[in-house]
Amino acid sequence: MLDFLDHIASVATAVVAMWLWVIFVWRVWRRRWALNKYLKDELAGYDRGQRSLLRISGELKMTETEVLDAAFGSKNVEVVVVPHPQTGYADRLLFRYIGPR
């Protein structure tokens, strides 16, 4: 009987692990898709479509870490480092869509 329960527990563990992995990958994909869509739509506006980390975070209701993960994981998003005018060191990050329109 214990041997049977051991097998059931092993299968249940594998199923739960696979389900959690699917949810994790889906959330990563969804964030990347939302960032790409937002930046692509902003590109059609009056400027070059560059948006700051704080603005994207507020518009998409994502944390800064989620925005950075989505941006660095996307081939269609370019990260632009804006230097400080006095020191020349990196001051801000801007993101823009560079993929197919």
Image: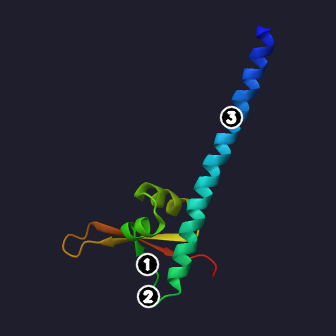
Q: Which residue is mark 1?
A: 50
Q: Answer with the quarter of the image where residue 100 lies.
A: bottom right
Q: In terms of secondary structure, where does tag 1 sit?
A: loop
Residue at 72%, 22% (x, y): give it. 9
Residue type, numbered disc 3: Val
Residue 36 x/y as whole percent = 57, 70
Instruction: Report the side of 8 relative to 98 (left or right).
Output: right
Looking at the image, residue 35 lies above or below residue 69 = below
Sequence order check, earlier mark of 2 and 3: 3
Mark 1 touches mark 3? (CB < 8 Å): no
Residue at 53%, 87% (x, y): give it. 44
Mark 1 touches mark 2? (CB < 8 Å): yes
Residue 1 x/y as whole percent = 80, 8
Residue type, numbered disc 2: Asp
Q: Which residue is mark 2?
A: 47
Q: Is residue 56 something that shows in the picture?
A: yes
- Residue lying furthest left: 86
- The answer for how far apart the CA atoms under marks 2 and 3 are is 46 Å
Q: Answer with the quarter of the image where residue 85 lies.
A: bottom left
Q: In terms of secondary structure, where does tag 2 sit?
A: loop
**Numbered disc in front, either 2 or 3:** 3
Q: Answer with the quarter of the image where residue 18 lies.
A: top right
Label 3 Cα crowd, 10 Å radius (few <14 / some 14-19 / many 20+) = few
Q: Which residue is mark 3?
A: 16
- The answer for how far apart the CA atoms under marks 1 and 2 are is 8 Å
Instruction: Report the side of 22 relative to 37 (left or right).
Output: right
Residue type, numbered disc 1: Gln
Residue at 56%, 60% (x, y): give it. 31
Sequence order check, earlier mark of 1 and 3: 3
